[in-house]
Image (cartoon, rainbow, N blue to C red):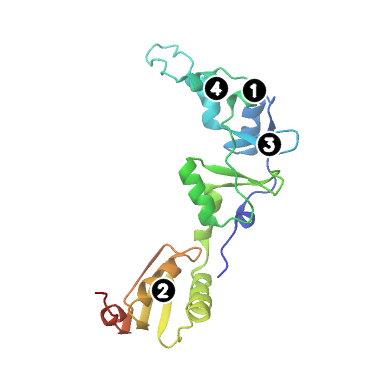
Amino acid sequence: MHHRTVEELMTRDVVRARSDTSFKELARFLEENDITAVPVVDEMDRPIGVVSEADLLRKSADQADPSGLTPVPHLEAWERAKAEGARAEELMSAPAVCARPEWSVVEAARLMETQHVKRLPVVDEADRLVGIVSRADLLRIFLRRDEAIREEINRDLLRGTLLLDPRDVTADVRDGRVTLSGIVEFKSQIPVVEQLCRGVDGVVSVSGDLTFRTDDARDAPTGT
């Protein structure tokens, strides 16, 4: 099976800022390029942080409401420093959380989830910026055509990897939902088949009614 990589999904033409890029320049970058964040790089083009809309909006949130209706929010010391910042190095979230081009969608998505970020600068072996990948980019795998998913499961997974007879097990795919039908030799194979199908890019869910010829869990010898 071929899993889509970060390199296949990332944006290559990346708008970047320097540590001394001003607040207004950063805001202009986001507006003119219709993006929500910009990586900050050093003189070797290595990401050192990311400035997002949220980082810039702290300055607005820290301003007093002229009407007096909304109190100024309490900010932690680090939030206050960002709200008062005027350059990228003072505003950015650092260090930059980065991905590698060869990573799978799963690896990138897990890093985003654990680090609570919405995009990842992508770096090469020398840690130089080569792209950026966002949540929206990763979601593109779910736009795969049902026919492509069905062919990958039936040909590459069921036949090529698991060596199942096409007369025994087949998969149907509609809107990314996989329905398995047929019979396998052993009961223990069923969760394996289902789990492998879930790992195919673009699969939303897996269900079905696979049966088995031998209950190997029941027939397996028990320890004393």
Q: Left of 30 or right of it: where is 141? A: left
Quadrant where the C terminus is found in the figure:
bottom left
Kind of residue at disc 3: Arg
Answer few, some or many: residues within 10 Å of disc 1's Cα (few below 14, many 20 plus, some between 14 and 19): some
User: What residue is disc 4 on?
Assistant: 82
**Marks 4 and 2, how far apart in space?**
50 Å
Q: Nearer the viewer, residue 181 or 96?
A: 96
Looking at the image, can residue 183 be seen?
Answer: no
Q: Residue furthest front?
A: 224
Query: Which of the two labelled residues, at mark 3 and mark 4, occupies the earlier sequence position?
Result: 3
Query: Which of the two labelled residues, at mark 2 and mark 3, occupies the earlier sequence position?
Result: 3
User: What residue is disc 3 on?
Assistant: 16
Quadrant where the N terminus is found in the figure:
bottom right
Q: Which mark is residue 27?
A: none
User: What residue is disc 1 on?
Assistant: 87
Q: Position of residue 135 (x, y in %)?
A: 52, 48
**Marks 2 and 1, how far apart in space?**
53 Å
Query: Which of the two labelled residues, at mark 2 and mark 1, occupies the earlier sequence position?
Result: 1
Circle 3/circle 4 CB separation < 8 Å: no
Labels 4, 2: front one: 2
Q: Helix, strand or loop at disc 3? A: loop
**Marks 4 and 1, how far apart in space?**
9 Å
**Marks 1 and 3, how far apart in space?**
14 Å
